[in-house]
Amino acid sequence: MWVRLFALPLAATVLLATAHISAQEPVVLRPLDAGGRITYFIADGSPDSAYRAGDEDLATWALSAWSAALNGALRFEPSPEPDALVRIYFVPTSAGQYGEARPIEVNGRQGAVVYIRADTDALGNQIGSRARLDSLLRDTIVYLTCVHELGHAIGLYHTADFADVMYFFGFGGDIPAFFYRYRTQLKTRADIANVPGLSSGDIERVRVLYRRN
C-alpha cells in the first residue's frame, strides 16, 4: 500500500507533504517464481473508479518497466483472469488508499492482486486540480502508482529514498515534486512506455531479489 490519504479542504494551498497523512506498511509479498512466465490480467475499471480508456496501457507499461529492469527474468504474458498470477483491478477510492497489493495463490503458485485507485482528486486539491488540467500529470500519477504497487507484487519493500518509485510517503517529503519530476520527462503520452520511472536503487534491489530466487 503506497499511502493512506485524508481529503484536504478545497481551500487548502499547502503542499500535500504538509497535510496530515497516516500510512501503514503493505502486506509483504514474496518474490514471484522466476522460473517461468508470469501471467497477468488487467480488468476494465469498475464504476466510479475514475478509470479511463487507455489505463490498461499504463499498467502494461508498468509491467514492462519491471521486466526490463530484470532483463527479462520475469516474463509477463497476458492470460484469462482465472489463470493469471498477477491481477490488476482499477477500483474506487476507499478509506483514502491509493493503491494496494495482496498475495493470492493460483494453482499452487504465489501471485498477487493489485488494486489501483485512479481518482487523482484523492491526492488533495493541489494535485487533483492540476491533474484535471494536465492529462499527462494524471497519467503520470496512475502509471507510477501501477509501478509502485507492482513492485510490491513482485516482492519489493518500501524504501526511505525519495528517488525511488518504491519510496514510502509516510516519510514525508515534497509529494507533488515526486510526481512532477517524472511528468517533466514526458512530451506525449506515448513517452511513458519508454520512461520507466525506476531509480538505480529500485533496479539494484529488484535484481538482488531475483538473483537470490
Image: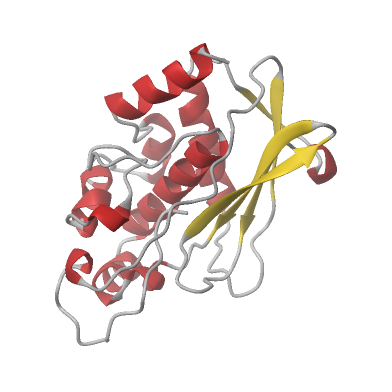
Residue lying furthest left: 14
Residue 59 lies, with reference to residue 2, above or below; the image says: above
Residue 69 visible within the image = no
Res 200 → quadrant = top left
Taking the image as shown, residue 172 lies to the left or right of residue 29, namely left
The structure residue drawn at horizontal position 26% and vertical position 42%, both measured from the top left corner, is 160
Residue 2 lies, with reference to residue 60, above or below; the image says: below
Taking the image as shown, residue 62 lies to the left or right of residue 20, namely right
Of residues 129 and 207, which is closer to you in this image?
207
Taking the image as shown, residue 111 lies to the left or right of residue 179, namely right
Residue 1 lies, with reference to residue 22, above or below; the image says: above
The structure residue drawn at horizontal position 34% and vertical position 53%, both measured from the top left corner, is 136
Q: What percent of the width, then of the height, locates residue 126?
A: 23, 72
Res 203 → quadrant = top left
The structure residue drawn at horizontal position 85% and vertical position 33%, both measured from the top left corner, is 107
Q: What percent of the width, then of the height, locates residue 173?
A: 18, 54
